Image (tube, rainbow, N blue to C red):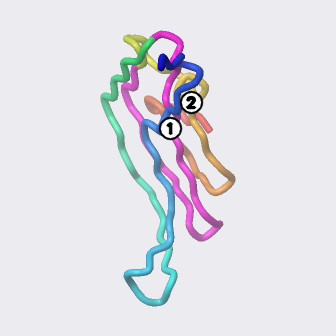
Amino acid sequence: MIYEPEDCFLPPLLRIDVNDTYYEKPYPRRGYNHDIYARDIYVIAEEGLGMPPVEIYGISKEHTSWNIYLENFFFNGKRITDAKGLNLKVNEFTGPVYLDGKQIN
């Protein structure tokens, strides 16, 4: 069977989220994500496949993801300069996300 690019599932390039943990008491215990850096990411994909999403989520007001720094992201040789090009997915519990020093959410 031949798959066309629009038929393909694209897993996230990067996913940062807050999950429950059942390994520590009290159950469930949730944390937060902050001051995370991802640099020099080069994605090469077939034409028409599209940029895999970058997903950054919190889970509540107390359990958020913020100050996420992304630098030097490229897709098929072209530098990504905005949230649309990055295929950025966030929710209401996501704080500032920066691409090359500029806030994009």
Q: Is residue 62 above or below residue 29?
A: above
Residue found farthest to the front: 1
Q: Position of residue 89 (x, y in %)?
A: 60, 40
Quick check: marks 1 and 2 in contact, CB under 8 Å? Answer: yes
Circle on res. 90: none
Q: Amino acid type of disc 1?
A: Val
Residue drawn at x 53%, y 43% as measured from the top left: 55
Give the class, few, some or many, for how many residues have Cα within 10 Å of label 1's Cα (few <14, many ≥20): some
Q: Position of residue 105 (x, y in %)?
A: 62, 39
Residue labelled with disc 1? 54
Q: Is residue 96 above or below residue 19?
A: above
The structure residue drawn at horizontal position 40% and vertical position 52%, both measured from the top left corner, is: 35
Q: Give whichever of 4, 1 is nearer the camera.
A: 1
Question: Measured along the vertical axis of the image, is residue 1 above or below residue 54?
Answer: above
- Left or right, 51 with reference to 45: right
Q: Amino acid at mark 2?
A: Asn
Q: Position of residue 86 (x, y in %)?
A: 52, 28
> Which residue extends farthest right?
92
Q: Name the residue that disc number 2 marks.
A: 87
**Distance CA(mark 1)–CA(mark 2):** 6 Å
The span picked out in magenta is: 47-74
Residue at (65% x, 50% y) in the render:
91
Q: Is residue 45 above or below residue 34?
A: above
What count of labels does the image hold? 2
Q: Is residue 68 magenta?
A: yes
Return the x and y of residue 2 as percentages of the image width and height: 48, 16
SS for dot 2:
loop
